[in-house]
Image (spheres, rainbow, N blue to C red):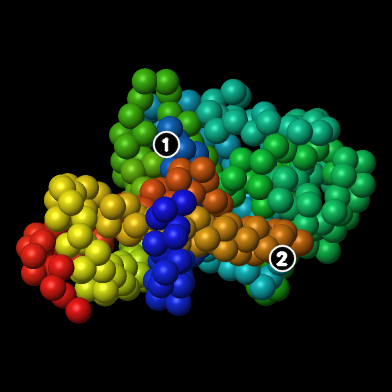
Amino acid sequence: MRLLRELGRRRLRTTLTILGITIGIWALVVFGSMANKINSIVDGGSQFYSDKVTVAARGTGMGLGQPLDIDTAGMVASLDGVDVVVPSVVMPMTDETSGMTMGMEMVSGQVGGADKGRETFELNVATGRELTAVDEGDYVTVLGSDLARQLDAAVGETVALRGRDFEVIGIIEPTLTMPDTTAMVPLAAGQELFVETLPALFAADLEPSQVVSGLTVYPVPGTDPEVVAESIRAAAPDLEVMTGADFDEQIGSATAIFNAILVGIALISLAVGGLSVINTMAMSVAERTREIGIKRAIGGSRSRIVGELVAESALIGFLGGVIGLALGAAIALIGNELGRESGLLLFMLTPWTAFTAVAFSTILGALAGLVPAMHAARLDPVTALRYE
């Protein structure tokens, strides 16, 4: 209470200083939550690609775009070190999206269970069931949690995917990664949809059952995926081959740069807030010079003077942090609610981000008040008592 009374003596200045910290923490929480969401998607992709090799037509990138002859699967399967090859198709859910897949609605088709138990990236069904090989020939789908919410779909209902009606047979549990916005369909149905995404003149000569967008290759247990990837590149130089290391290099580096930009913006805002704390505490010391002299004259130690002033500045940082966290959490919540209908969830506020934000603002406040506090502690008591 004493600290609050001291701050209350300079209400306007204290309020403006807290506001400076608040803006910095607000930026840190908002941008940090965006970085958390991006990192969760990238981590999911890194986990997915870690133990396998993906193959696509040259220049397509992660199996999007150009078609691949399904017979390529047989050629790849014949190479040393290859255990299972799963043909698949992947495409945007609408023609308005292309290129980057993260955070966008996708349609993915493959034969249910074709991985023969080799897939380690687990998808658990919340309601309904998974796709099976028996579903080939049917128009059924298993939806990601975000996509199901966006389409307001439930098991047993019908949804439209690229102009075709599909019966929903399952909805997967949230993964916080790309499957949350993906509709999984049987391979045959996916092939039909995929061919329709290609230019008409090109698609006219294609048989859907002979076309895929990519292959997922599972090495023989104990075989290095990099070795299998090199074998595929040697056998078919015209293919785009990617391993987990390639994914981390391509996506991870770009994500690190993006995260650095986001956090950098927030830290600049916090630096400005920290300077305002220094200014506030320096002025406070100047105004309370006589008071500090009295405390020193009656036996107050230098450490006690420093402790009191640092505690005041730390409280300023703490209050700014708490208010900034509340505002940032509100923005993240409102932003996700507004984007929930479209399946675009941009923020993921974690307990660690919240704790770090408040702890950082408190420490920043304490450090910003340390220099004025040490200056106050070095004041000569006699000189301070004469100060007007």
Q: Could you tell me residue 74's position as x and y percent?
A: 53, 37
The amino acid on which the numbered mark 1 sits, given as a three-letter code, is Ser
Q: Is residue 208 visible?
A: no
Residue projecting furthest to the top: 222
Residue 257 against residue 52 in the figure, above or below: below
Q: Nearer the viewer, residue 352 or 358?
A: 358
Residue with the mark numbered 2: 338
Q: Would residue 150 appear left or right of 323 to someone viewing this image?
A: right
Q: Could you tell me residue 136's position as x and y percent?
A: 79, 38
Q: Secondary structure at mark 1?
A: loop
Estimate how packed mark 1 is, as few (under 14), some (14 to 19) or many (20 or more) residues with alpha carbons within 10 Å. some
Estimate how packed mark 2 is, as few (under 14), some (14 to 19) or many (20 or more) residues with alpha carbons within 10 Å. few
Point 76% across, 33% down: residue: 126
Q: Residue 238 lies in what quarter of the image?
A: bottom left
Q: Nearer the viewer, residue 45 or 167?
A: 45
- From mark 1 to mark 2, how far is it between C-alphas? 34 Å
The amino acid on which the numbered mark 2 sits, given as a three-letter code, is Leu
Q: Is residue 221 visible?
A: yes
Residue with the mark numbered 1: 50
Residue 354 against residue 199 in the figure, above or below: above
Point 43% across, 23% down: residue: 220
Point 92% across, 47% down: residue: 157
Q: Would residue 295 appear left or right of 324 to someone viewing this image?
A: left
Q: Secondary structure at mark 2?
A: helix
Q: Could you tell me residue 36's position as x and y percent?
A: 48, 52
Question: Comparing marks 1 and 2, which lies closer to the viewer?
Answer: 2
